């Protein structure tokens, strides 16, 4: 470890200068020789470095998501060129170039901060050995050697001997208890960060080897940190624990505000967005509008979470627009954009026997109607008392023939029931019968 740290000795002067500047600020508050002043100086160094690495972290997120999306294509290339490793590598590089993906981008934050990590280790190792380094002169060196965090010196390690720990005015028990607790916290924070990434921010609809690799790293990294932690000084453990906590908080923010499409985190985010739209009647915030805009632009390529979100908007009476806003309509059906398009049900095709049976039922119904009409006519003749004609009248086979006979003028139209009722009413008033009357008997002419 000392050999590796010496490779980054060129950056020890800037790192020591930053620590000294923070020490001056915190020393004025807590005292220059306290563990709080030196410990918070290391924590502030971590915060400053991680702020500078935010652009690389954003690039890491994009690269990780691109790698997740490319896993099915990469697997297809591996299976297609299984026997030709050179062609397989060429196709992989071509795929990376076409999509603008860099496999090493996911490691950029770790690679970028590793020089600062080893430079800090080199500075703390020099303090433990009583040597000045960088801008840390002899007075600052003595102040740093007296600084303790919960009874453990900043330069002490878990594997140090009792004599070396005693030279730093501390006990071996205090050093090992403090370092053990910090190692456990460091490993636990690393495990929780990787676990929330796997459980909440991974597209569960696509099963790829990348997910299995991430799952293995979730268990391997904490073990690596635990094994290496016993060789780290307390000051380096403070540095690494701080950077792990920062990564965990940063990861939680990204998962909450910019989740991976198709993940559980995206579903939770879209449900929160749906509640916000229902409460305020609009999409608030430029970032949220950009997310809605991106989902609208996907069209039919939306995942299940996004289709559920659009269906919820439609149910609430809203329709998403191409610019990321929403409009409230009077009637928005479940067929709104984003919901699954419902197909109209086509009538079932009937067999020949079913069509014949249906035609026979229709003819029977028409025959029944015809018989009912003839029966009504006979009843009407009996009611009106008209004398039946000696001539034989042709019976109409259909309603159209009957209507044509009445309208032709060849034979007088039969009065309807309403007219016959009116005739009887008129007969009661005038005492005479309308229509053709019988001749009077000769005996009735005698007076």
Image (cartoon, grey):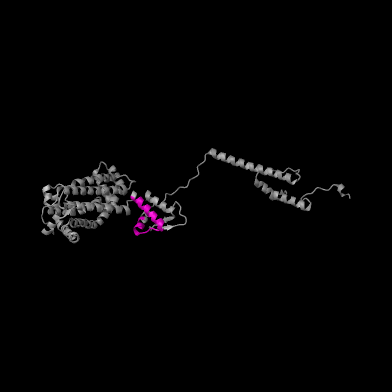
Q: Position of residue 79 (x, y in %)?
A: 29, 42
Residue 137 visible? The answer is no
Magenta residues, start to end = 265-291
**Secondary structure character of the magenta stretch overall:** helix
Q: Is residue 356 magenta?
A: no
Q: Is residue 275 magenta?
A: yes
Tell me: 435 left or right of 127: right
The residue at the point 56 percent across, 40 percent down is: 358
Residue 422 visible? The answer is yes
The residue at the point 20 percent across, 54 percent down is: 113
Tell me: 187 left or right of 124: right
Tell me: 370 left or right of 169: right
Q: Position of residue 31 (x, y in %)?
A: 17, 59
Q: Position of residue 311 (x, y in %)?
A: 42, 51
Residue that sits furthest to the right in the current view: 447
Relative depth, front residue between 103 and 242: 242
Q: Position of residue 402 (x, y in %)?
A: 67, 47
Residue 395 sits above or below residue 109 on the image: above
Relative depth, front residue between 121 and 270: 121
Relative depth, front residue between 58 and 434: 58
Task: Tell me which corner region of the image, top left, top right, bottom left or bottom right, holds residue 219.
Answer: top left
């Amino acid at each position: 470890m000392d050999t590796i740290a010496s490779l980054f000795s060129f950056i020890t002067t800037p790192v020591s200068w930053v620590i000294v500047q923070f020490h001056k600020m915190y020393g004025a508050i807590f005292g220059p020789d306290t563990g709080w002043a030196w410990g918070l100086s290391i924590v502030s160094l971590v915060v400053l470095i991680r702020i500078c690495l935010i652009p690389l972290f954003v690039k890491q997120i994009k690269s990780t998501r691109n790698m997740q999306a490319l896993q099915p294509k990469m697997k297809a290339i591996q299976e297609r060129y299984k026997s030709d490793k050179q062609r397989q590598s060429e196709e992989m590089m071509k795929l990376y170039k076409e999509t603008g993906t860099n496999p090493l981008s996911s490691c950029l934050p770790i690679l970028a901060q590793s020089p600062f990590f080893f430079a800090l280790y080199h500075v703390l190792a020099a303090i433990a050995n009583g040597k000045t380094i960088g801008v840390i002169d002899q007075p600052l060196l003595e102040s740093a050697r007296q600084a303790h965090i919960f009874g453990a010196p900043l330069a002490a390690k878990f594997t140090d001997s009792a004599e070396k720990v005693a030279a730093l005015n501390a006990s071996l028990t205090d050093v090992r208890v403090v370092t053990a607790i910090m190692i456990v916290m460091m490993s636990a924070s690393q495990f929780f960060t990787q676990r929330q990434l796997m459980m909440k921010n991974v597209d569960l609809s696509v099963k790829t080897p990348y997910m299995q690799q991430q799952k293995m790293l979730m268990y391997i990294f904490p073990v690596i940190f635990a094994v290496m932690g016993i060789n780290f000084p307390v000051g380096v453990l403070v540095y690494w624990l701080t950077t792990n906590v920062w990564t965990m908080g940063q990861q939680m923010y990204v998962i909450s505000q910019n989740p991976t499409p198709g993940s559980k985190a995206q579903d939770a985010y879209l449900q929160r967005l749906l509640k916000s739209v229902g409460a305020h009647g609009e999409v608030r915030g430029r970032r949220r509008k950009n997310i809605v805009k991106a989902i609208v632009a996907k069209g039919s390529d939306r995942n299940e979470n996004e289709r559920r979100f659009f269906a919820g908007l439609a149910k609430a009476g809203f329709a998403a627009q191409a610019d990321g806003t929403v409009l409230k309509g009077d009637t928005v059906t479940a067929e709104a954009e984003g919901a699954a398009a419902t197909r109209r049900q086509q009538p079932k095709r009937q067999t020949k026997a079913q069509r014949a049976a249906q035609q026979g039922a229709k003819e029977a119904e028409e025959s029944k109607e015809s018989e009912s009409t003839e029966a009504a006519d006979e009843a009407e003749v009996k009611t009106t008392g008209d004398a039946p004609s000696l001539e034989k009248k042709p019976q109409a086979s259909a309603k159209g023939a009957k209507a044509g006979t009445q309208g032709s003028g060849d034979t007088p139209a039969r009065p309807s029931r309403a007219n016959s009722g009116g005739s009887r009413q008129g007969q009661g008033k005038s005492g005479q019968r309308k229509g053709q009357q019988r001749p009077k008997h000769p005996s009735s002419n005698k007076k």
